[in-house]
Image (cartoon, coloured by chain):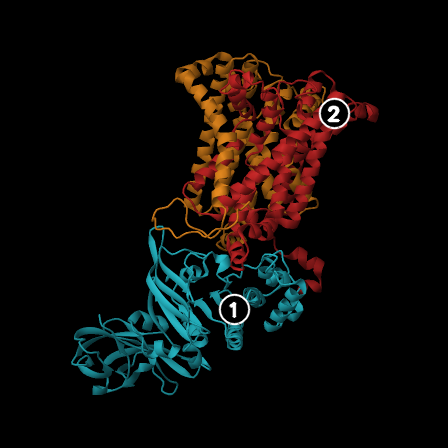
Chain colours: A cyan, B orange, C red
Amino acid sequence: MPGATERTGGSTAIRVENLSKTFDTAAVLHDLSLDVRAGELLALLGPSGSGKTTLLRIIAGLDFPDDGRIVFGAQDATKLPVQQRAVGFVFQHYALFKHMSVAENIAYGLNARKRADRPAKAEIKRRVGDLLDLIKLSGFADRYPSQLSGGQRQRIALARALAVEPRVLLLDEPFGALDAQVRKDLRRWLREIHDRTGQTTIFVTHDQDEALELSDRVAVLAKGRLEQVGTPDEVQEAPVSATVLKFLGDTIEVEAIAQGGEVRVNGRLTPVAAPEGLVGPIKLYARPWQLQFAEGDGAHLEGVVRSSYRTQGRQRIEVDRPEGKTVVVEAADTNRFAAGSPVGLRIIGGHVFPN
Amino acid sequence: MAPPTRANPPTRAKRRFLRPSVIPGFGLAFGYTLTCLGLIVLLPLAALVTRASGLGLSGIWEVATDPRVASALRVSFGVSLVAALTASVFGFLIAWVLTRYRFPGRKIVDAVVDLPFALPTAVAGIALAALYAPNGLVGAQLARVGIEAAYTPVGIYIAMVFIGLPFAVRTVQPLIAEIDKEIEEASATLGAGRVHTLVRVVLPPLIPAVLTGFALAFARGVGEYGSIIFIAGNLPYVSEIAPLLIVIKLSEYDYGGACAIATIMLGISFLTLLAINLIQAWSRRRFGYV
Amino acid sequence: MSETFAPVTLAEARPASVVTEGRWIRRGLIAVAILFLALFLVLPLLTVFAQAFAKGIGAYLAAFTEADAHAAIRLTLLTAAIAVPFNLVFGIMASWAVAKFEFWGKNLLVTLIDLPFSVSPVVSGLIYVLVFGAQGLVGPWLLEHDVQVIFAVPGIVLATIFVTFPFVARQLIPLMQEQGTAEEEAALTLGASGWHAFRTVTLPNIRWGLLYSVLLCNARAMGEFGAVSVVSGHIRGLTNTLPLHVEILYNEYNFVAAFAVASLLAGLALVTLLVKSLLEWRYADEIAAGARGH
């Protein structure tokens, strides 16, 4: 990720301290703390119901925590009204003003200012023009939102948020409502804009690929708790919990025994190391490519091939295990496996976590 | 309408009256709403309830069983029932034709359905009276076949159908428009004939709406005054309706009598409202929509 | 595609659609529907104009030269001019509270707002007599202070407000609920004050629904008969609205004048229907939530 290392060393722009929030009776955030660094592109990643959107809305001042603080730089912003927070919020369905033209939408935040703070008309016009250039929609100033495609609306919503020169840009599932190809283009484009402006940005997503591809750091949320924060490499290479691991991709779960720093499956040693003090029956988690086909003593597991299919130069083989579970193994697209043939599986990597 | 914003302080209460929101102006809007509702609607209605409870159940019963009052109530409820039934049948047919078929002038016909909503009841009343009087355009024809419309319950019936029709049409129309044609096609591919499809597949989900429309037309008919009194002739024991009797009691300064009749009518209104709510609750459970 | 070659024959050879009725049944049902509407709705409307002009245009116009007719027109306009703005403001306030916030007892509040729709017009008048009448709750006190509500203009206005009370709120609540709060929130994050957001975002979003509901509210306010009849006292030239004036003329067997005045109200109804239909055709989505219900 270009430029990621310089930026992640930045000072703290936003500090979230011990945030708790309940809706009616259900808790959505539990004692959550998080530092957002100046200039970074941070992804809040989690399944639906993990509290990520609520966290984003609390940072924006659109929702209120029951407990905890939000600090912008050195200023306690917990009780700061939304209007004074200077955040740029991009809503999931954009929330463009239907009855205003594109230019009016982008200029809205500037026109809403008190007369003394409001830029001159010509200045507003110039800034709208600049932003339209930035989002590559220069000819669209007089169009109305209903005349635009989803991707174009998304970009207008972003320009509208940037127009007020926010100290942080907040995006709620920014690509959620778009189709696959537009999504990909917009992702790359957002990354470019971020690299160019250096704007501190937080975005919410439930899509791991999106978070891993786009962000400098990823904060993984589950059930209202922060599971892990780190660069995409860190969370992938060293997930701190099974929840994080499972959420980041397909996982195979295997019964294992830990003892003396080693992990054994079916009595056979695996290359996975057990952390100090972890002893007894545990679960070993592996990715599909961390299993290999092997024979005899080399195999940790046995099974019968159920089916296989090819995808993008790789082969995915479903293997039925004797205890009834089916695991997916990924292998190079060379050997063919006939359904019904018995195979052995060797674990070449994986993760174990304290119970 | 919204007052200038202020910072909404975070609250700790778990079970609260209002879910905290960044949108301003709740206090003002809610307070204003409640004040208006209280002064304009609830207070005057409470006055009626107080007055009626002064009479007691026996007092109300006494008024209700007075032969003239009983007859007026019978006319109001009985005729309204028949009129609502008529309005429902033809209302369904009109709604079906308007949503399912394309024909020239459809939009105008659709607009005409709302005429009883827009036309003042007194105007409708004198027009119906003129039409159905023995020397009127339609009345003369009816007289030839031996039907007396004006100054009989038949006239009341006609006015009530007039006033109730839009309710019957407008409650079923949007639901007919929303029927997924695929379910009809599915029924046809499974071998059902058109009549079978209509009766077994299309109609059942529409029943709650038809019942709601019927109840609305019925409630409106029972309470209706302006469009009826001109055509009804208002003969005691024959074509006198309950709302008119309230007016008569009031003009005689018999407030107790007026209140008793009004309470009975109000009670029926609420029962109808309750019935509608039950129908809709049932519909939501059974069909997933109202 | 084959239709381009032989449209007529193939179109006729196609089997009947499975999702509609046969052509003759269709035509029959359309005929029944139109006939029924013509007989029950259109004919009475035409009668109003036919009777109004039965004795020529001179007799028609004569009905409007009367001082009492002028007074009735004035009172009707005055009543609507108070009742409609009142309910407009109430409707906006109520729908703002109900549609934009979550609070306890919301459904009850909406049911109560709807209440006047299920009360007979005559009962609507009666309850105000019970409050303000000579034997009413505050009537005697008002009498002492020489304030007349019943059998006077204030009573007429109050009764009219009551019967038209739910019109605007009922239209706006589902519309604003469907629009949600995202646009207002967007305006707030961009620095707009609550009032600014309301004026520049909420109001433009509900403008057609607002106009629509005001139109219907006004039609009912000008045309209300039963409730107004109970509180008015029918004092000619003083407490007669147009519908009450029609009644008096009719009961005096002054049919031409009665229908002439009625034609004024019927004209109002037609204009209302026309504008209403135009709004529905043009702005269906911006009037009603999901364009469902009435």
Image label count = 2
Q: Secondary structure at mark 2?
A: helix
- Residue in the foreground of this view, choosing between C165 and C117: C165
Can you tell which quarter of the image residue A127 is in?
bottom right
Q: Residues within 10 Å of mark 1 (few under 14, many from 20)?
A: few
Q: Is residue B98 left or right of residue B205?
A: right
The reply to whether label 2 and label 1 mark residues of one chain is: no
- Counting from the top left corner in percent of width and height, residue B125 is at 65, 25
Which chain does the residue under circle 2 lie in? C
- Given the image, on which type of amino acid does mark 1 rest? Asp
In the rendered structure, find residue A179 and report the number of the disc placed on it. 1
Q: Is residue B258 visible?
A: yes
Q: Is residue A195 above or below residue A167?
A: below
- Residue in the foreground of this view, choosing between C138 and B165: C138
Q: Residues within 10 Å of mark 2 (few under 14, many from 20)?
A: some
> Which part of the image, by quadrant, shows the N terminus of chain B?
top right
Q: Spatial distance from mark 2 to mark 1, Cα to Cα?
A: 65 Å
- Counting from the top left corner in percent of width and height, residue A164 is at 55, 64
Q: Secondary structure at mark 1?
A: loop
- Residue in the foreground of this view, choosing between C148 and B57: C148
- Counting from the top left corner in percent of width and height, residue A194 is at 51, 74
Q: Which residue is mark 2?
A: C70
- Residue in the foreground of this view, choosing between C29 and C46: C46
> Farthest residue toward the front?
A116
- Given the image, on which type of amino acid does mark 2 rest? His
Q: Is residue B149 visible?
A: no
Q: Is residue A58 left or right of residue C2?
A: left
Can you tell which quarter of the image residue C155 is in?
top right
Q: Is residue A99 above or below residue C93?
A: below
Q: Is residue C274 above or below residue A79?
A: above
